[in-house]
Amino acid sequence: MAANVCYLDSDGASFYKVGKKGVRPMSGGRPSRVGMVLGRKILLLSHGLLYFTREKYPPSSLKNLSGIIANEIGDLFPTLSEPMFHFEVSGAHKNYTMVNVWAWQREPVENIAGTFGYDYIIPEDVLFVSAEPEITVFTHKAHVFAIAHGAGGVVSARVLPYPPRPADFELFCRSLGSFGESVARVRTYLPEEFPPSSFGIAVVRYEPTQHPLSLYSLQGFAPGRFKTSGWMKSLDVGHMSRIPAYALAAYLVASYLSVRGLDNAMLKARDEIKKVNGNISFLAALKEKDTDGKTLDALVQKTTAIPSTLAVMDMVSGVMPSGTYFSRMSIKDRLVEMGVVSTDPTAVIRAFGQSPHFTDVRLGGDPVKDGSGTYRFQLTVSVAENKGLPAMASSRPAPPEPDKRRWPDNPAGVNGNMPQSGVPVLQATAPPAGFHPRVNPASDVGVIIKHHGVF
């Protein structure tokens, strides 16, 4: 039974009957309802509408390959806004599979569905199959097509300028690589002589066909693998085109309501943030006005960071080697300036430099040697931070612990009265005549350091 074929190219659609009697146009050039009831309905896509590529994929089933190609079809053909595709395996190897992929724009195919309810979509290129590597050259509506094909189907295709030039054909052959070297013949359906090739390929000339060349290949062709979904046969394009518009309108309404809800929530959150920021600003202003608190905090931090004078003196005396004493010492914060008298100035400087309690050891001038064999020199050091030195504390002594000893009932030599508790109550008496209290110089730390050089 003859097949009903719609040949679709860039200029539009033309309709044919293809069967045992050959290829003939449909009566009136349009498909009739009666004629469309019987026979297959094939949509044949012209080479001018097709985009072709060959890709390498991991070994997989046809179903998996179809899913993989569908996911990346947009990247394979970025110039197509809504691509449809067909693929065929051209070579299967142990580690990979070579796949030929054809793609075309969806719009012209869907537009023809209202006029021609097709059951099959066939790219024109897949109809070119030969036992040996060949190149077929034919013309259609002032376009010249060159298609290289073999037992595995189409290898490459190109549109050549009319009339074709030898340089253009040789460039196409070179682009085929190793396949171009194995081409057995060139089949040409051009009305004029085909230009000879420098590759030495035999040229076989055929009479030009009245209709597209690929239509003749449909005779006896099994189109089962090009079957389309059944819903496309009865597709009401006018009604179906409204469904995306309705869905888009519903989506926009739902999006608008969601955005309004989000806006309200954001406004409430913004108000709460303003209140919290106001409270923070108020507390910050109060803290800025609290100058007394700032002064006390600074004073506490400064005093706690500075080691006590007695602790510094203790550390200094622990570092000094034997035979060394001070003639003067000045302590300001962490800076200690000393006048040192020693028989070995090098040992003094080395001792302070190796001590973990002091840093920045500096010698003020050259040591001066006196007649006794000792040296006098000035030394400046800095107390290291975070070395566990006790902080500066009050110099006021702590009150003495109460005497908890039990006294005898009648102690001798005590001028006073004895209460019932057993603790004597002393009575102050006037000092004896000629008694003048004074400070013992030996108990004055400043005097010891400055005048006697004890350590």
Image (cartoon, rainbow, N blue to C red):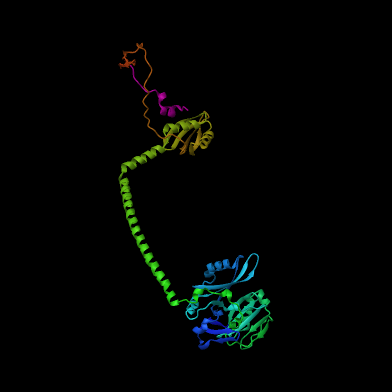
Q: Is residue 245 left or right of residue 430?
A: right
In the rendered view, would you say 434 is above or below 341? above
On the image, the x and y values in percent for residue 416 come to 31, 14
Question: Which is more toward the observer, 135 or 66?
Answer: 66
Task: Please say whether residue 425 is visible from this viewpoint.
Answer: yes
The count of marks equals 0
Q: Quadrant of residue 20?
A: bottom right
Question: Which is more toward the observer, 374 or 321?
Answer: 321
Q: Is residue 280 left or right of residue 145?
A: left
Reply yes or no: does residue 375 show up in magenta.
no
Image quadrant where one finds the N terminus: bottom right
Question: Which is more toward the observer, 231 or 45?
Answer: 231
Q: Is residue 121 left or right of residue 179?
A: left
On the image, the x and y values in percent for residue 276 come to 33, 51
Question: Which is more toward the observer, 127 or 224?
Answer: 224
Q: Quadrant of residue 151?
A: bottom right
Task: Please say whether residue 362 is visible from this viewpoint.
Answer: no
On the image, the x and y values in percent for residue 33 come to 49, 83
Q: Quadrant of residue 330?
A: top left
On the image, the x and y values in percent for residue 180 come to 66, 77
Which residues, given as a range, are shown in magenta?
434-455
